Image (tube, rainbow, N blue to C red):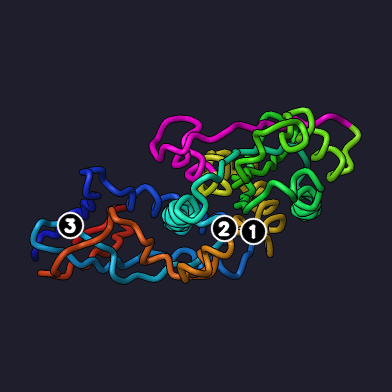
Amino acid sequence: MVDRKVLVDRSRSGKIRPWRERKLENLQYSDYLQILHYKKAHRVKECGEVLRFVEDEQGHRKLAQTWFCHSRLCPLCNWRRAMKQSNQLTQILAEAVKQRKTGRFLFLTLTVENTAGYRLKSELRQMGRAIAKIFQYKKVAKNLLGYVRSTEVTVNHEADQPMYHHHMHVLLFMKSSYFTGTDNYISQAEWTGYWQRAMKLTYVPIVNVEAVRPNVNRHKNSLLASAQETAKYQVKSKDILTNNQEQDLQVIDDLEQGLAGSRQVSYGGLLKEIRKQLQLEDVENGDLVNTDSDDQQTDQVVCVIVAKWDYLRKNYFI
C-alpha cells in the first residue's frame, strides 16, 4: 500500500493555507446541523471533501476543482468567500481611485445595542433600511460618490442566553469637497445623530468614523485594511464553535434563522458601477474555487494534484 502524503498547500508568500482547520470546523458545524435536524447537514459535511489542484514548475498551486456547500455559516465557504470579497473589493477601490483621483475614503462603523436571537432577522432588515435612508440625507447625498457596506454579527456568550452584537461597516467614497467647510463636512456627532434618527433609536448609539489613508498597505486606517475589515467573515467560527454544545446549538439555530435571505456585502453608487464594469460575479452565490487572488495564480501547469479528506486520520492526503 502506497503511503499517502499530508496535503501542504502554501501561498506564494510561504503561508500554509488552513484547509485542515477549516474542514475540521466544517465537520463540527455539520454535526450540529444534524442534531438540529437541518436537511442540509449532509451536503455541508461533503463540502470540500476532494480538492483538485494544478501546480506549475515553481510548485505554486491553485485550486482547480472542488465542491462547496455555500452554507452561510460553513467555515470552509466563509474562508473562501472572505478571500474573494477582499480581492474583488481591492480591485474595485483601485479602479475608483483611478477614475476619481480626488475622491476621499471614510470608514464608518455603526452599532446598536445587543439583541436576542429571535429579533436578529428584523433588526438586520431595519439596519439595511436605515443606512439607505442615511445615504438620502441631503448633506450625505451631495458628498457621496459610492459605498460598500457589510454586516458583522458577534456573539456575547456571557448572558443567560446568547446575545448578538450586530453592526455595520461602511466604506464611503466621498467627493474631496467633503472636507471643505461645515456645509459639507459631517462630524462624528452628526453621523451619530443620523444613525439614531434613521434607526429610530431611543438611546445614543456608538458610531465611529475615520478618514482612510489612500496608501494601500496594511496599516490601520489604510485603504487595504479598511477593505479587509469590510470583506471579512460575517460570523467567525470561534463564535459558533465553542465546544459548549448546548449554547453552540442555540447560536447556530439563531444565526441560521436570522441571517437567512440577508446579504453580507452590498455596493452603491460609483463602486457598484465599477463592479459591473469589471464584470465581477456575485460572491454570495458564485464560484468559490476561483477567488481572483494573485496569491493563487500559477504559470504553465505541469501536474495535477488530488487531495482527499480522510475521516479517520482527520486530514487531507495526496
The residue that label 2 is drawn on is 271
- First in residue order: circle 3 vs circle 2: 3
| Disc 2 secondary structure class | helix
CA distance for labels 2 and 1: 6 Å
Q: Kindly identify which numbered label has been placed on residue 60.
A: 3
Q: In front of the other: label 3 or label 1?
A: 1
Mark 3 and 1 residues: CB-CB less than 8 Å, in contact? no
Label 3: few (<14), some (14–19) or many (≥20) C-alpha neighbours in 10 Å: many
Q: Which residue matches tag 1?
A: 268
Amino acid type of the residue that numbered disc 2 sits on in the rendered structure: Leu
- Quadrant the N terminus occupies: bottom left
Question: Mark 2 near mark 1, Cβ–Cβ under 8 Å?
Answer: yes
Nearest the camera: 199 or 255?
199
Magenta stretch in the rendered image: 203-229
Q: Dot 1: within a 10 Å radius of its alpha carbon, few (fewer than 14), some, or many (20 or more) residues?
A: some
Q: Does the image show residue 120?
A: no
Q: Amino acid at mark 1?
A: Gly
Q: Which mark is residue 84?
A: none
